[in-house]
Image: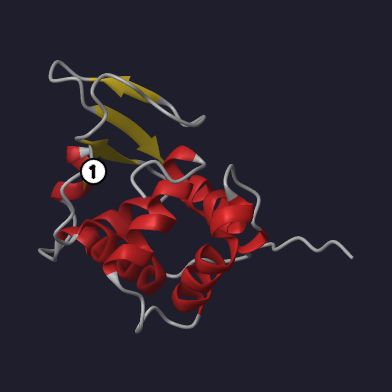
């Protein structure tokens, strides 16, 4: 039997949980909202809250891979900056697509890591309260790269 997960909604809280947990203390990942005009009109809140609002408004954020060394992975739009970091343009739909891959095991090394990635997805799906940094990091790697690059 084959099944396919369809995510019909990601809430503000879902996005904040994922982005906050994935970037907190990360050595390779950071994000920012490039639309300064939009961001300036938002009330002062934490950065993850701003990222979630930007994404839910149909805009994109930039996720920077500081370990890229001039390489990019996956199919998302990506620019390599002057320091050889990879800057990925990420939309809400990209996050949904990536999380669906996590839920379904539809990514490069699914046979090897499928059970664990599926558990990471379920932690986020269940409110993200038990989602830890390595789990959120792995979800973000699948979202950005389509595979685990950094273990």
Residue with the most extreme top position: 82
Please, which colouring scheme is shown? secondary structure
Mark 1 neighbour density, 10 Å: few (under 14) some (14–19) many (20 or more): many
Note whether 75 is above or below 145 in the view shown. Answer: above
Query: Label 1 belongs to which residue?
Result: 33
Q: Secondary structure at mark 1?
A: loop
Residue with the most extreme right position: 1
Q: Taking the image as drawn, is residue 91 in sight?
A: no
Residue 78 placement, left or right of 1: left
Name the residue located 46 percent from the left edge and 70 percent from the top edge. 120
Name the residue located 19 percent from the left edge and 57 percent from the top edge. 42
How many numbered marks, from 0 up? Answer: 1
Note whether 132 is above or below 80 in the view shown. Answer: below
Residue 150 placement, left or right of 112: left
Residue with the most extreme left position: 44
Where residue 44 sits in the image (x, y, percent)?
A: 10, 63
Where residue 19 sits in the image (x, y, percent)?
A: 30, 60
Note whether 44 is above or below 51 in the view shown. Answer: below
Residue 91 placement, left or right of 64: right
């Amino acid at each position: 039997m084959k099944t396919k997960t369809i995510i019909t909604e990601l809430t503000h809280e879902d996005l904040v949980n994922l982005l906050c947990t994935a970037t907190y203390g990360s050595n390779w990942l950071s994000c920012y909202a490039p639309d300064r005009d939009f961001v300036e009109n938002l009330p002062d809140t934490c950065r993850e809250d701003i990222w979630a609002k930007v994404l839910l408004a149909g805009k994109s954020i930039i996720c920077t891979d500081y370990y890229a060394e001039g390489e990019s992975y996956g199919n998302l739009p990506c620019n390599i900056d002057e320091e050889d970091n990879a800057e990925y343009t990420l939309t809400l739909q990209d996050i949904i697509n990536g999380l669906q891959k996590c839920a379904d095991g539809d990514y490069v090394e699914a046979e090897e890591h499928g059970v664990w990635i599926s558990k990471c997805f379920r932690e986020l799906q269940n409110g993200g309260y038990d989602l830890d940094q390595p789990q959120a990091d792995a979800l973000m790697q699948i979202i950005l790269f389509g595979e685990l690059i950094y273990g």
